[in-house]
Image: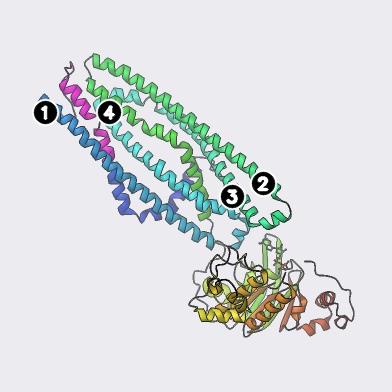
Amino acid sequence: MARPKNTHDSFSRFGQVLRHFLPALSKEKPLIAGAMVALFSSVTFRLLEPWPLKFILDLLIPNKAPRTNGLFPALNNLEPNAILILAPLSLVVVVALCATSDYFKTVGFALLGNRVMTRIRGKLYRHLQALSLSFHDKARSGDLLVRIIGDIKLMRDVAVTALLPLMASVLILVGMFTVMFILNWQLTLLSLAVMPLFGLSTVRLGKRIHAAARKQRQREGAMAATASEAINSVKVVQALSLEDHFESSFSSQNKRSLSEGVKTRRLAARLERTADILIAIATAAVMGYGAKLVLDNQLTAGDLVVFLTYMKRGFRPLQDFAKYAGRLAKAAAAGERIVELLDQTPDIQDAPDAIDAPPLEGKVEFAHVDFEYEEDVPTTSDLSLTIKPGQYAVIAGDSGAGKSTLLSLMLRLYDPQQGVISIDGTDIRDWTLPSLRGQISVVLQDTILFAADVSENIALGASDVDQEQIEAAARLANAHEFIKNLPQGYDTVLGERGVNLSQGQRQRIAIARAAVRNAPILLLDEPTVGLDENNERSVRDALRRLARGRTTLLVTHDLRQTMDADVIFFIADGCISESGTHQQLLKENGTFAQLYRSQTGDPQAAPQGTPHSVTS
Ligand code: ATP
C-alpha cells in the first residue's frame, strides 16, 4: 500500500476509512446517542467538581477580593452554615453523578466499539472470500489472517481504550478552557501559550511514530505469513530439513518487528515527556501570575484554585494524546491495512444484468479463448473446443500446457481476456456465479477435508441432502465400506485437513461429495495421481460411475485414461493441437500417439515415431 506522502493523502486515507466504517456506525444510532449523552453529562459534572472548594475558599474564608462568583451569583447571599453543609454535600453529589455517567459512557462506547468492529470483521471476511483467485494467488494467507484477526482486534481495543477517552478529554478541554476564559481571559491565554510548541512536537514526532507503527504492523503480517507457510507445509519442511531456513527468516522478521515496536514506544515516550514539561511550564506561569493577581485583589484564591485544577484536567488530552500516540498510530496502521483489503474489488463478479443459470444440459464450448495469468505471458491463445452434453472428455498435454487452467476458466475462477466460454450456447458470464458453480462438481488431485464429521464433509456445498443420499453417494464412490469401519462411522470427525484418512480414502470422500451435488457437469483434475494400484482402480471405478450421464472433463497426464474417452483434446502451445477419439489420435500418429507409446510401451500403438516422456 502506498504510504501517505502529504496531508492531502492522509485526509483521503482517513476519508476511505470513514467510508467503510460509517455504514457500520450508522446502524448504532441509539447506542451512539446514549453514549454521547453519558459523555456530555460526565464532562459537565467534571467541570463542576472544583466548584464546592471554590465556594468554601471564596465565601467562607476572609478574602480581600470582592466576595462574588460570577457564574453562580445566587450563592453569594447564602449563610455560612448553609455553605458549610451544601458545599461538601454537592461535592459528593457531583462526584456520584459523574461516576454514574462515566460508567454508562464506558459501557456504551465499549459496546459500540465491539459491535462496529464485529460488523467490520464480518464484512472483511465476506469480502476476502469473494476476492478473486488472482488476488489470493498473490496474497499471503498468514498476513490476511493477521489483518482479519489482529488488526481488527487492535483497532477495537484502541478505539475503546484510547480513542474514546481521548474524545472525552477533548470535550473536557473545550469546556474547561471556556470556563477559564470567563473567569480570567488573560490567565487563560497565558496557559495556552505552550500549545503551539506542543503542536509542533506532535506533528514532528507523530509522523515518525506513525511510520514506525506501520512498519511494525507490516512486519507482523510478514512474520505470520512465514509462520503459516511453514506450519501448513510442516511435512515438507521436516522432510527437506528446512527448519533452520524458516526459523532464521522468522526470527529476523521477529527481531525487526521488535525493534520497530521499541522505536514506536521510545518516540511516544519522548512526546509524553515533552507534554509533561510544557504543561509544567504553563502551570508555573499561571501559578506565578495568578498568585500576583490574588495579591493585587484582582482574583480570588478560589478562582485561582479552580483555574489550576482546570488546567491540570484541561491539559489531560495533551498528556493522553502523547500517552496513546503509539497505540493510536498502530491502530491507524491497522485501519489502513483493513481498508486496503476492503478496497480490493473482485475481478470476477456477477454482471449487473446477470441471471440465474437454468438447469444445464452440459454442452461446453470454448470459442477463441485467450487467457493469461500475467501480462504478456499467454497461457491459452485462440483456444477452441466443443464438448457435447454427457460426453466424457479428456484434456491431455505436457505439464504447464494449461490443462487445469481450462477447468478454472469453466468455474469462472478467472475470466478470459478474449473469447467466450459458453454452456448450452450461453456465455457463462451472463449467469450469476452461484447458479453456475452450483451445477458443476469438482474432484481435484489434493482433496481438502474440513474439521467436521464424514457426513458433513460429503454434504458440503449441497443443499437439502439427507443421510440416505449421503450414503448412496458414498456407495457410488466406493467409500461406504471404509466409512462404516471408522470408529464412529459417518459421525467420525475428520482432522483439520482429513489427515487421519489415506489419500485414496480422501479422494473417495471427494467423489462422494461430487456425487451428492448431482451436478450435470463434472470436472476432474488429476484425481488419481499418487494413488497405489488398488486405490487407483477403486477411485477410477467410482469416477466412471459418477461420470455416467454427466458432461465430464478429465485433466490427466496418464494417457491410459484416454482409452474410454468420447473425445480427447491435446493441448500444446496454448491451443488444441489434436482432438478426436483415442483410435483417431493414434492413427494421426502425432504428439499424442508418441506420448501414449512412450507411457504404455505398447508396440501395437507404435508403428513409427520417436517416443519421449511427459515432462511433469
Ligand atoms: P500440470 O499438468 O503440471 O498441472 P497444467 O497443464 O494443468 O500443468 P496449468 O496449471 O493450467 O497447467 O498452468 C498453465 C501455465 O500457467 C503454467 O505455465 C503455469 O506456470 C501458469 N500458471 C498456473 N497458475 C498460475 C497462477 N495462479 N499465476 C500465474 N501463473 C500460473
Numbered circle sitting on residue 224: 3
Label 2 CB less than 8 angstroms from ligand 1: no
Q: Quadrant of residue 492?
A: bottom right
Could you tell me if the residues under marks 3 and 4 are in contact, i.e. CB atoms within 8 Å? Answer: no
Q: CA distance from mark 1 to mark 3?
A: 67 Å
Marked residue nearer the N-terminal end (2 or 3): 3
Where in the figure is residue 499, as x and y percent of width and height?
62, 64
Q: Which residue is mark 2?
A: 247
Is 101 located above or below residue 587 in the figure? Answer: above
| Label 1, label 2: how far apart the Cα atoms are | 75 Å
Question: Ligand 1 sits in which quadrant?
Answer: bottom right
Residue 181: numbered disc? 4
Magenta stretch: includes residue 268: no
Q: Earlier in the sequence, mark 4 or mark 2?
A: 4
Q: Which residue in the protein does label 1 denote?
A: 82
Which numbered disc flags the more N-terminal residue, 1 or 3?
1
